[in-house]
Every structure is written in structure tokens, then in C-alpha cells.
Image (cartoon, rainbow, N blue to C red):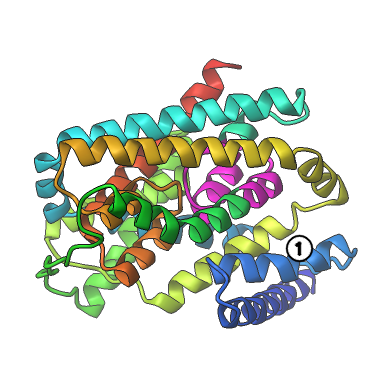
């Protein structure tokens, strides 16, 4: 009976999350599936409405699908292009990891020890809402704080991108360039998609067994990349399935919200804004440096270096006519670098 109630609660939460997604999408909110669902479910949780749900499968689904989304960006074409732009990719990844650690230190100092170092680093990391919230869940950080801080930064990024792009263009270089890259890989058959799903889940469990940080996300990411590289085929993830993953993430994040989380977020809102401004400014400096060593257009440079989430930035790159391949490669490598390096930094600092 308890399992039946939990399953019904899971369905109810998902339905409410979907309504929040539809409302946020209609209002053109960035990352509507995450933010819209999180606002609805978080408000219910803070109001004392506790809806039971099956936590394990919901969290596993969110983590694995997030890993697959990142891993799908790594294929033979991506590796070939990465060899051609090794310097900008390396510089971008090292720069953004350094910025994230610096902002994490500032947030930790401003928090006066009320937040763990892992929470501060995950909240300040130049990743996306879903990626860093999944990372927070896997590393024992405060997911509510991380999701809130990342949401604020994504809002700021989406609001300022058009102005930053125009500013970069006014200082030389075209506003945008047409991306002529085409995906020539053959689509996988239904049987191959099933095998892909088995391999991805197996990779998640394998990384969990060996004690990897963020095992389900990193394991799924590595397995998806391995399938891309070994088969040369594409395994498309339907847009609705991405939405499902983001709503599942919102369900798991919402239950971590509490009045104490809200009070802490309000107390640290000023340091958060300073952190966002610091990351945004240094990201713009990186774009200016890359403009000196590459021939990329202004729109591509701003999007490739902005501290937004992978999925949000890729969608924006298509809307703005930027080189999606360059943007995707820089953000993918940066995301992997952050996910790998942040736990090492946090553990080294105790």
C-alpha cells in the first residue's frame, strides 16, 4: 500500500511539475522545465504540503539522462574539431574552472561557515541548473541552495547575452556566422537504442560501484560518449525526454527546500550577486582573449564563454545563428572539467 501511495504521489508531483513547465514556457522563462516545475513544487513543499514519491528511480532517471545529454556531444566529429582548437578549449576550461573555484571561495567566506565548501563550489560553478543540481545531489551538497543560486545566474546570463553580443560585435568582428556543419551520422535503429540504454545504465552502475564522484551522471556521460565513438551513430534523445529528466530533477530538488534554505539564500543574496558579476565579467574577458587567438564571430565567442548551462546555451546558439559546434565543444569540455575538478578541490580543502 505504501508503494502504491508513493507511486501515486510521484505521478501527482510530475503532473504538477508539467503544469509549471507549461506556464513557464508560455512566459518565456529560461529553462522552463526546471524553473517552472521547481517554483510550483518548491512552493508546495515550503507551504507544508508533503507529497510522497519514489525517490530512488526519480533521482536515477534525472542523473542518467543528464549524463546522456552531455555525453551525446562527444563523438568522432567533436574529437576531430577539438584537435583543431586545442588551445582555446584548454584555456577556456582552465579559466572557467578557476573562476568557479574563486567564486566558491568568496561565497564560502561570505557564508561564515554556514555552507559547506562543496555547496559553495557547486553553487558558484559555471555550469547549468540541472547539471550542477545533479552534481550537488551526488556529492552531498545542499541541493536547494545550489539550484537557487544557479537559477539566479542563468536568469542573469539570459538577460545580458544580447547586450554582451552587441558589445563584442561593436569592438570588431561579425555579429554572427552561419554554421554549415551538418550531422552526417546514421541514426540508430530501435534495437540499437535499447542496447544504448542498457550500456548507459550499466556505465552508471559501474561508476557507482567504483566510488566515482557523481557516479550516475559521469558514468552515463562516459558510456554515451563511448557508444558515439565506437559505433559512429547518433542516439537522439527526444525533446520530451529531456523535459521529463528536468522535471524529475525538480521533484528531487523541491523536497530539499525548507524555510532555513530560503532564509540562508536571502542572507547570502548580496554575495551571490557579487559572485555572478565576477563570473560574468571574467567570462567576458575570456571571450576577448579568445577573439585575439581565433577567428570566431562575436556571437559564438560570447555564447562559448558565457557561464550558462549547456542545454540553454546550445538552444540560444541556434536562435542567434552562432557556430553551435564550437559552442557545444567548449561548454562540454568545460562541464566535464568542472564535474571532475570541483570534487577534487573540495576534498583537498577538507
Closer to us: 33 or 279: 279
Q: Which residue is situated farthest in the top direction here?
A: 349
Residue 261 pos. (x, y %): 80, 46
Instruction: Reply above or below: 62 against 278.
Output: below
Hey, which quadrant is residue 28 in on the image?
Answer: bottom right
- Asked if residue 202 is among those painted magenta in the image, a careful observer would answer no
- Asked if residue 125 is among those painted magenta in the image, a careful observer would answer yes
| Secondary structure of residue under mark 1 | helix
Q: Check disc 1 and report the residue beneath it.
A: 42
Q: Specify the quadrant that holds the C terminus.
A: top right
Q: Specify the quadrant that holds the N terminus.
A: bottom right
Q: Which residues are magenta?
A: 122-149
Residue 329 pos. (x, y %): 25, 49
Instruction: Reply above or below: 3 against 300.
Output: below
Residue 240 pos. (x, y %): 45, 78
Residue at coordinates 87% horizontally, 68% vertically from top-left? 49
Q: Is residue 179 visible?
A: yes
Q: Is residue 274 left or right of residue 183?
A: right
Amino acid at each position: 500500500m505504501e508503494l502504491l501511495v508513493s507511486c501515486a504521489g510521484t505521478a501527482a508531483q510530475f503532473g504538477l511539475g508539467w503544469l509549471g513547465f507549461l506556464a513557464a514556457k508560455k512566459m518565456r522563462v529560461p529553462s522552463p522545465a526546471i524553473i517552472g516545475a521547481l517554483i510550483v513544487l518548491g512552493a508546495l513543499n515550503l507551504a507544508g504540503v508533503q507529497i510522497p514519491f519514489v525517490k530512488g528511480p526519480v533521482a536515477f532517471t534525472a542523473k542518467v539522462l543528464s549524463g546522456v545529454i552531455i555525453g551525446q556531444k562527444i563523438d568522432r566529429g567533436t574529437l576531430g574539431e577539438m584537435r583543431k582548437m586545442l588551445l582555446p578549449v584548454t584555456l577556456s576550461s582552465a579559466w572557467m574552472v578557476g573562476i568557479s573555484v574563486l567564486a566558491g571561495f568568496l561565497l564560502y567566506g561570505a557564508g561564515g561557515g554556514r555552507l559547506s565548501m562543496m555547496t559553495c563550489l557547486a553553487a558558484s560553478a559555471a555550469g547549468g541548473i540541472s547539471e550542477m543540481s545533479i552534481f550537488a545531489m551526488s556529492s552531498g551538497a545542499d541541493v536547494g541552495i545550489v539550484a537557487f543560486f544557479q537559477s539566479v545566474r542563468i536568469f542573469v546570463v539570459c538577460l545580458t547575452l544580447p547586450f554582451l553580443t552587441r558589445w563584442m560585435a561593436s569592438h570588431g568582428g561579425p555579429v554572427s556566422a552561419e554554421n554549415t556543419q551538418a550531422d552526417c551520422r546514421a541514426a540508430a535503429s530501435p534495437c540499437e537504442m535499447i542496447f544504448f540504454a542498457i550500456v548507459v545504465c550499466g556505465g552508471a552502475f559501474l561508476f557507482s560501484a567504483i566510488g566515482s564522484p557523481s557516479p550516475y551522471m559521469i558514468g552515463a556521460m562516459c558510456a554515451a560518449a563511448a557508444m558515439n565513438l565506437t559505433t559512429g551513430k547518433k542516439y537522439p534523445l527526444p525533446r520530451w525526454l529531456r523535459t521529463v529528466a528536468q522535471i524529475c530533477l525538480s521533484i528531487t530538488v523541491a523536497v530539499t527546500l525548507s524555510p532555513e534554505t530560503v532564509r540562508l539564500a536571502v542572507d547570502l543574496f548580496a554575495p551571490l550577486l557579487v559572485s555572478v558579476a565576477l563570473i560574468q565579467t571574467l567570462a567576458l574577458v575570456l571571450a576577448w582573449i579568445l577573439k585575439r587567438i581565433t577567428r570566431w564571430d562575436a556571437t559564438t565567442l560570447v555564447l562559448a564563454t558565457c557561464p550558462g548551462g549547456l542545454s540553454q546555451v546550445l538552444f540560444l546558439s541556434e536562435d542567434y545563428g552562432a557556430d553551435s559546434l564550437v559552442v557545444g565543444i567548449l561548454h562540454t569540455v568545460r562541464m566535464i572539467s568542472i564535474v571532475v575538478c570541483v570534487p577534487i578541490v573540495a576534498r583537498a580543502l577538507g
